[in-house]
């Protein structure tokens, strides 16, 4: 497979680094000099490979998980995740722009994925959380969750709209791909998920269990993109009241909480004091540009920056006295843990001594200096303990001497996307240029430099 020159440069860099990472971690005085920009190139390239080399072969979409050590029965690379695939198609665009693959290679890969998605199981236009790659059939996420997952669909379509924008002015084949994505976009029946016209969106629907999950999406968490997408739909748009009365709980979403001198103006579900796991400031903002984004409830840039600073400061204060925590080793978010998947967050009960590299890496736009400091610690000091084929592993715990060789799509994706948004704004530029999104944001009362008056 032919790659651009940058591929060979990065491979040389990676080889040099490996020479200095053998045995115990090399002392800093022995480490080669490398620019921050080159280091970010290397991180992006390795993480990109999760969605390229590691993609499910039939669909080309993102495997839910990849365990390089082969442990646990979950290591089935035929199961794809719809939300993680939304992050993954963004990563493919980054691969094209960074020269990891050619535009033609990226296009062919994405066309295969879009063709597959048009034939895969959908329910009122929405995809399930998990699907089998070989067949496109739903894999139940839980007993009653075997149909539409509207939040995961929002993450997937967030990525696909970036792909549409990227190729819409290209050659004839690229324009057809953009048109196919537009058709999928228009077929999602967002308003149907108000469950008969209620002023709120429901997360799940099953063809045989119907609304048994009964999960109304309200109050601040990882889901603002859901309401933005639903309001932006040109065919099945939701009324403003679903946002103001449902999501924002008639204004009760607003709060004022100050921790370590940093103010949060939104009441985070189950985590008012510290703001909860950091993915709440990542998933919705991979395409949705938080810079200057405001509505009647919050300034989302300031809010996300403060959320990140609180998370980092908790790790510095380290009230539980976990080994390894500090100014260069921080970041609590949802990831694997020694006891299974867990939404790690500041707080006595939510902190298990587990650091998730995605937390600091995906926060690059918010805290570039602190995120770079963490990245260098992860790479130079912890080295091969947490660094592998597809970038940094999902999570680790020095406290428990726990370093699993495991990856999750929903953690790898935000890391590469937010690093690229910090560097070039690529995905923010693609998503926010979409006229439907601009219309939806304006409808909900948002202010942004992208919104045309």
Image: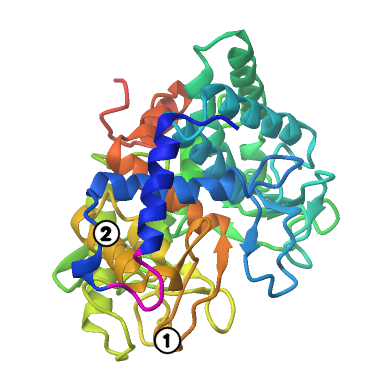
169 shown above or below 253:
above
Q: Is residue 446 depicted above or below 140 in this figure? A: above
Which circle, 2 or 1, is nearer the viewer? 2
Q: Residue furthest top?
A: 172
Q: Quadrant of the C terminus?
A: top left
Residue at screen point 53% across, 57% down: 389
Left or right, residue 137 beside residue 250: right
SS state under label 1: loop
Magenta stretch, main secondary structure, is: loop
Q: Position of residue 135 (x, y in %)?
A: 84, 44
Quarter of the image where one finds residue 417: top left
Q: Which residue is mark 2?
A: 371
Disc 1: which residue: 349
Are there few (<14), some (14-19), or many (20+) residues within 10 Å of tag 2?
A: many
Say which of 308 and 330 sits in front: 330
Residue shown at the point (75%, 34%) measured from the top left? 116
**Real-space Cα distance between discs 2 and 1?**
25 Å
Crowd tier of the residue under label 1, counting other residues whose Cα lies within 10 Å: few below 14, some 14–19, many 20 or above: few
Q: Residue at point 33% right, 88% down?
A: 322
| Residue 24 painted magenta | yes
Span shown in magenta:
20-26
320 or 222: which is nearer to us?
Answer: 320
């Amino acid at each position: 497979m032919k790659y651009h020159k940058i591929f060979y440069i990065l491979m040389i860099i990676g080889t040099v680094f490996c020479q200095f990472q053998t045995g115990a971690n090399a002392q800093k005085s022995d480490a080669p000099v490398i620019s921050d920009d080159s280091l970010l190139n290397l991180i992006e390239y390795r993480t990109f490979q999760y969605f390229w080399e590691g993609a499910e072969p039939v669909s080309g979409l993102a495997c839910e998980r990849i365990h390089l050590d082969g442990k646990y029965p979950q290591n089935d690379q035929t199961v794809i995740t719809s939300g993680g695939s939304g992050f993954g198609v963004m990563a493919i665009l980054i691969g094209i722009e960074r020269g990891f693959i050619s535009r033609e290679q990226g296009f062919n890969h994405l066309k295969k994925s879009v063709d597959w998605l048009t034939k895969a199981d959908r329910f009122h236009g929405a995809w399930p959380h998990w699907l089998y790659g070989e067949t496109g059939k739903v894999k139940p996420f839980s007993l009653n969750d075997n149909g539409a997952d509207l939040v995961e669909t929002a993450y997937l379509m967030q990525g696909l709209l970036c792909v549409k924008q990227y190729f819409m002015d290209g050659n004839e084949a690229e324009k057809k791909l953009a048109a196919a994505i537009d058709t999928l976009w228009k077929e999602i029946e967002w308003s149907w998920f108000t469950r008969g016209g209620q002023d709120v969106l429901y997360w799940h629907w099953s063809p045989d269990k119907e609304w048994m999950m009964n999960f109304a999406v309200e109050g601040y968490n990882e889901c603002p993109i859901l309401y933005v997408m639903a309001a932006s739909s040109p065919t099945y748009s939701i009324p403003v009241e679903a946002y103001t009365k449902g999501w924002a709980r008639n204004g009760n979403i607003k709060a004022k909480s100050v921790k370590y001198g940093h103010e949060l103006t939104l009441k985070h579900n189950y985590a008012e004091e510290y703001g909860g796991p950091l993915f709440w400031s990542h998933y919705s903002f991979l395409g949705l540009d938080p810079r200057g984004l405001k509505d009647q409830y919050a300034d989302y840039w300031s809010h996300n920056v403060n959320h990140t600073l609180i998370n980092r400061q908790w790790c510095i204060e380290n009230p539980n006295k976990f080994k390894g925590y500090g100014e260069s080793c921080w970041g609590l978010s949802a990831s694997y843990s020694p006891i299974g998947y867990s939404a790690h967050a500041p707080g006595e009960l939510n902190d298990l001594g587990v650091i998730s590299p995605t937390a600091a890496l995906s926060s690059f736009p918010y805290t570039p200096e602190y995120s770079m400091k963490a990245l260098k610690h992860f790479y130079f000091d912890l080295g091969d303990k947490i660094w592998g084929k597809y970038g940094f592993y999902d999570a680790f715990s020095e406290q428990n001497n726990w370093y699993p060789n495991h990856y999750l799509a929903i953690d790898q994706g935000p890391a590469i996307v937010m690093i690229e948004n910090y560097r070039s704004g690529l995905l923010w530029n693609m998503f926010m240029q979409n006229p439907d999104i601009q219309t939806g944001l304006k409808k909900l009362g948002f202010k942004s430099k992208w919104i045309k008056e």
